Image: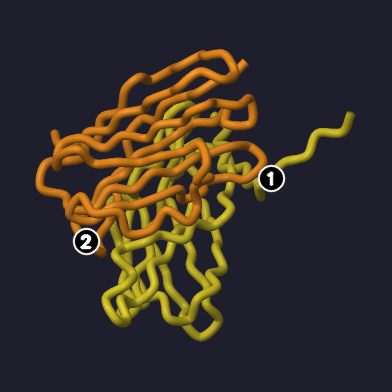
Amino acid sequence: GESVGLHLPTLSVQEGDNSIINCAYSNSASDYFIWYKQESGKGPQFIIDIRSNMDKRQGQRVTVLLNKTVKHLSLQIAATQPGDSAVYFCAEIPSNAGGTSYGKLTFGQGTILTVHP
Amino acid sequence: DARVTQTPRHKVTEMGQEVTMRCQPILGHNTVFWYRQTMMQGLELLAYFRNRAPLDDSGMPKDRFSAEMPDATLATLKIQPSEPRDSAVYFCASAQAGETQYFGPGTRLTVL
Protein backbone atom coordinates (compact mmCIF):
# COMPACT_ATOMS: atom_id res chain seq x y z
CA GLY A 1 0.00 0.00 0.00
CA GLU A 2 1.00 3.59 -0.35
CA SER A 3 2.94 4.98 2.58
CA VAL A 4 1.58 8.11 4.14
CA GLY A 5 3.58 10.44 6.26
CA LEU A 6 5.14 13.82 6.50
CA HIS A 7 6.81 14.93 3.31
CA LEU A 8 9.52 17.21 4.54
CA PRO A 9 11.12 19.80 2.28
CA THR A 10 14.63 18.83 1.30
CA LEU A 11 17.74 20.81 0.53
CA SER A 12 20.83 19.28 -1.03
CA VAL A 13 24.09 21.21 -1.16
CA GLN A 14 27.74 20.60 -1.85
CA GLU A 15 30.26 20.76 0.94
CA GLY A 16 31.53 24.29 1.29
CA ASP A 17 28.41 25.94 -0.11
CA ASN A 18 26.20 28.18 1.98
CA SER A 19 22.78 26.81 2.94
CA ILE A 20 19.59 28.70 3.56
CA ILE A 21 16.68 26.99 5.29
CA ASN A 22 13.38 28.81 5.44
CA CYS A 23 10.46 28.67 7.81
CA ALA A 24 7.09 30.39 7.84
CA TYR A 25 5.59 30.79 11.28
CA SER A 26 1.94 31.19 12.05
CA ASN A 27 1.49 33.22 15.19
CA SER A 28 2.08 36.95 14.89
CA ALA A 29 2.14 37.09 18.69
CA SER A 30 5.23 34.86 18.88
CA ASP A 31 8.18 36.70 20.32
CA TYR A 32 10.85 34.05 20.60
CA PHE A 33 12.12 31.77 17.86
CA ILE A 34 14.54 28.86 17.94
CA TRP A 35 16.25 26.71 15.36
CA TYR A 36 16.91 23.08 16.22
CA LYS A 37 19.02 20.48 14.42
CA GLN A 38 18.08 16.83 14.68
CA GLU A 39 20.49 14.16 13.55
CA SER A 40 19.35 10.62 12.93
CA GLY A 41 18.72 8.79 16.18
CA LYS A 42 19.18 11.86 18.36
CA GLY A 43 17.05 14.48 20.03
CA PRO A 44 16.65 18.00 18.65
CA GLN A 45 19.70 20.10 19.43
CA PHE A 46 19.56 23.85 20.00
CA ILE A 47 21.38 25.86 17.33
CA ILE A 48 20.44 29.49 17.70
CA ASP A 49 17.59 31.66 18.88
CA ILE A 50 16.26 35.14 18.22
CA ARG A 51 13.77 37.40 19.91
CA SER A 52 11.19 39.43 18.06
CA ASN A 53 12.91 42.73 18.82
CA MET A 54 15.79 41.65 16.57
CA ASP A 55 16.05 41.11 12.80
CA LYS A 56 19.29 39.18 12.72
CA ARG A 57 21.49 37.18 15.01
CA GLN A 58 24.77 35.49 14.26
CA GLY A 59 26.45 32.49 15.78
CA GLN A 60 29.34 30.35 14.73
CA ARG A 61 28.77 29.68 11.00
CA VAL A 62 25.03 30.25 11.46
CA THR A 63 22.85 33.33 11.06
CA VAL A 64 19.15 33.61 11.78
CA LEU A 65 17.06 36.25 10.05
CA LEU A 66 13.61 37.26 11.19
CA ASN A 67 11.09 39.10 9.03
CA LYS A 68 8.07 39.83 11.19
CA THR A 69 6.21 41.58 8.39
CA VAL A 70 5.79 38.36 6.45
CA LYS A 71 6.26 36.02 9.44
CA HIS A 72 9.33 34.40 7.99
CA LEU A 73 12.41 32.96 9.62
CA SER A 74 15.54 31.71 7.92
CA LEU A 75 18.67 29.88 8.99
CA GLN A 76 21.84 30.46 7.03
CA ILE A 77 24.72 28.03 7.41
CA ALA A 78 28.06 29.17 6.03
CA ALA A 79 30.53 26.73 4.50
CA THR A 80 28.20 23.78 4.99
CA GLN A 81 29.88 20.57 6.08
CA PRO A 82 28.79 16.92 5.87
CA GLY A 83 28.26 17.00 9.63
CA ASP A 84 25.54 19.59 9.09
CA SER A 85 23.37 16.97 7.40
CA ALA A 86 20.25 16.67 9.54
CA VAL A 87 16.63 17.74 9.85
CA TYR A 88 16.28 21.38 10.85
CA PHE A 89 13.23 22.62 12.74
CA CYS A 90 12.14 26.12 13.49
CA ALA A 91 10.07 26.65 16.61
CA GLU A 92 8.17 29.60 18.02
CA ILE A 93 7.03 30.60 21.48
CA PRO A 94 4.09 32.99 21.80
CA SER A 95 4.49 36.03 23.97
CA ASN A 96 3.67 35.22 27.56
CA ALA A 97 0.43 37.17 27.61
CA GLY A 98 -1.28 36.54 30.91
CA GLY A 99 1.55 34.33 32.00
CA THR A 100 0.10 31.26 30.35
CA SER A 101 2.67 30.43 27.69
CA TYR A 102 5.32 28.87 29.94
CA GLY A 103 7.56 28.47 26.95
CA LYS A 104 5.33 26.09 25.02
CA LEU A 105 7.00 25.55 21.66
CA THR A 106 5.21 25.17 18.36
CA PHE A 107 7.44 23.30 15.94
CA GLY A 108 7.54 23.68 12.19
CA GLN A 109 7.49 20.65 9.95
CA GLY A 110 11.26 20.47 9.43
CA THR A 111 13.63 20.56 6.47
CA ILE A 112 16.02 17.78 5.54
CA LEU A 113 19.48 19.11 4.73
CA THR A 114 21.85 16.78 2.88
CA VAL A 115 25.44 17.86 2.35
CA HIS A 116 27.39 16.05 -0.34
CA PRO A 117 31.18 15.81 0.02
CA ASP B 1 28.19 19.52 30.52
CA ALA B 2 24.59 19.64 31.74
CA ARG B 3 22.13 17.63 29.68
CA VAL B 4 18.75 15.96 29.85
CA THR B 5 18.93 12.21 30.35
CA GLN B 6 16.28 9.65 29.46
CA THR B 7 15.91 5.98 30.24
CA PRO B 8 15.53 3.52 28.72
CA ARG B 9 16.92 4.49 25.33
CA HIS B 10 15.08 1.63 23.66
CA LYS B 11 12.07 -0.38 24.75
CA VAL B 12 10.35 -3.24 22.97
CA THR B 13 7.20 -4.54 24.57
CA GLU B 14 4.04 -6.41 23.76
CA MET B 15 0.63 -4.86 23.39
CA GLY B 16 -1.13 -4.53 26.72
CA GLN B 17 2.02 -4.17 28.79
CA GLU B 18 2.81 -1.16 30.95
CA VAL B 19 5.64 1.09 29.82
CA THR B 20 7.39 3.66 32.00
CA MET B 21 9.81 6.19 30.58
CA ARG B 22 11.97 8.37 32.80
CA CYS B 23 13.60 11.73 32.37
CA GLN B 24 16.08 13.68 34.44
CA PRO B 25 15.89 17.38 33.54
CA ILE B 26 18.85 19.72 33.64
CA LEU B 27 19.51 20.80 37.20
CA GLY B 28 17.85 24.13 37.88
CA HIS B 29 15.36 23.94 35.03
CA ASN B 30 11.80 24.32 36.29
CA THR B 31 9.85 23.36 33.17
CA VAL B 32 9.71 19.84 31.73
CA PHE B 33 8.08 18.80 28.46
CA TRP B 34 7.18 15.42 26.98
CA TYR B 35 7.03 15.05 23.20
CA ARG B 36 6.31 12.18 20.86
CA GLN B 37 7.82 11.97 17.38
CA THR B 38 6.55 9.79 14.57
CA MET B 39 6.95 9.82 10.82
CA MET B 40 3.25 10.47 10.45
CA GLN B 41 2.81 13.35 12.89
CA GLY B 42 6.24 14.79 13.46
CA LEU B 43 6.94 16.26 16.92
CA GLU B 44 3.86 16.46 19.13
CA LEU B 45 3.70 17.96 22.58
CA LEU B 46 2.09 15.54 25.01
CA ALA B 47 2.37 17.33 28.35
CA TYR B 48 4.41 19.78 30.33
CA PHE B 49 5.12 20.73 33.91
CA ARG B 50 6.32 23.84 35.66
CA ASN B 51 7.73 23.59 39.15
CA ARG B 52 6.51 19.97 39.10
CA ALA B 53 2.88 20.98 38.57
CA PRO B 54 1.17 19.77 35.39
CA LEU B 55 0.22 22.73 33.20
CA ASP B 56 -1.11 21.15 30.06
CA ASP B 57 -1.64 17.53 29.13
CA SER B 58 -4.16 18.10 26.37
CA GLY B 59 -1.89 16.39 23.85
CA MET B 60 -1.95 13.14 25.74
CA PRO B 61 -4.47 10.29 25.40
CA LYS B 62 -5.95 10.47 28.87
CA ASP B 63 -7.22 6.94 29.12
CA ARG B 64 -3.82 5.28 28.84
CA PHE B 65 -1.12 7.90 29.32
CA SER B 66 -0.06 9.56 32.53
CA ALA B 67 2.77 11.95 33.33
CA GLU B 68 4.15 12.83 36.73
CA MET B 69 7.04 14.58 38.43
CA PRO B 70 7.67 12.81 41.72
CA ASP B 71 10.47 15.28 42.42
CA ALA B 72 12.40 18.03 40.68
CA THR B 73 14.96 15.59 39.29
CA LEU B 74 12.59 13.02 37.82
CA ALA B 75 9.75 13.10 35.32
CA THR B 76 7.91 9.97 34.25
CA LEU B 77 5.63 9.12 31.35
CA LYS B 78 3.62 5.96 31.70
CA ILE B 79 1.51 4.09 29.16
CA GLN B 80 -0.89 1.46 30.43
CA PRO B 81 -1.95 -0.53 28.50
CA SER B 82 0.37 0.05 25.56
CA GLU B 83 -0.82 -0.34 21.98
CA PRO B 84 1.08 -0.71 18.68
CA ARG B 85 0.06 2.82 17.68
CA ASP B 86 2.08 4.13 20.64
CA SER B 87 5.28 3.09 18.88
CA ALA B 88 7.32 6.26 18.52
CA VAL B 89 10.30 8.11 19.91
CA TYR B 90 9.45 9.92 23.13
CA PHE B 91 11.50 12.98 24.01
CA CYS B 92 11.78 14.85 27.22
CA ALA B 93 12.96 18.47 27.21
CA SER B 94 13.66 20.88 30.03
CA ALA B 95 13.92 24.65 30.23
CA GLN B 96 14.02 27.56 32.55
CA ALA B 97 10.51 29.01 32.16
CA GLY B 98 10.00 30.63 28.77
CA GLU B 99 13.55 30.01 27.65
CA THR B 100 15.22 27.56 25.30
CA GLN B 101 14.22 23.92 25.64
CA TYR B 102 16.98 21.33 25.75
CA PHE B 103 16.07 17.86 24.58
CA GLY B 104 17.12 14.47 25.83
CA PRO B 105 18.23 11.65 23.53
CA GLY B 106 14.77 10.07 23.47
CA THR B 107 13.26 6.67 24.23
CA ARG B 108 12.48 4.61 21.15
CA LEU B 109 9.37 2.58 21.97
CA THR B 110 8.19 -0.36 19.91
CA VAL B 111 4.94 -2.02 20.85
CA LEU B 112 4.39 -5.35 19.13
Q: Which mark is residue B97?
A: 2
Identify whether A50 is placed above or below B69.
below
- Residue density around tag 1, few if under 14, some if 14–19, many if 20 or more, within 10 Å: few
Q: Chain of mark 2?
A: B
Q: Residue at x 49, y 51 (%)?
A: A89
Q: Residue at x 59, y 43 (%)?
A: A112
Task: Name the colour assigned to chain B in the rendering.
Answer: orange
Kindly identify the amino acid type of the residue bearing the numbered disc 2: Ala
Residue nearest the viewer, comparing B20 with A109 = B20
Pair 2/1: label in front: 2
Left or right relative to B50: residue A108: right
Colouring used for the render: by chain
Residue A14, percent from left and from top:
57, 39
Task: Name the colour assigned to chain A in the rendering.
Answer: yellow
Identify whether A54 is placed above or below B71.
below
Kindly identify the amino acid type of the residue bearing the numbered disc 1: Leu
The reply to whether residue A17 is visible in this rendering is no
Question: Which residue sits furthest left?
Answer: B28
Residue B48, percent from left and from top:
34, 52
The reply to whether residue A89 is visible in this rendering is yes
Residue A113, percent from left and from top:
56, 42
**Could you tell me which quadrant the N terminus of chain B lies in?**
top left
Q: Residue B71 appears in which quarter of the rendering?
A: top left
| Marks 2 and 1, how far apart at CA | 30 Å
Question: Which residue sits furthest right?
Answer: A1
The residue to which callout 1 is attached is A6
Q: Residue at x 55, y 73 (%)?
A: A26
Q: Chain of mark 1?
A: A
Label 2 SS? loop
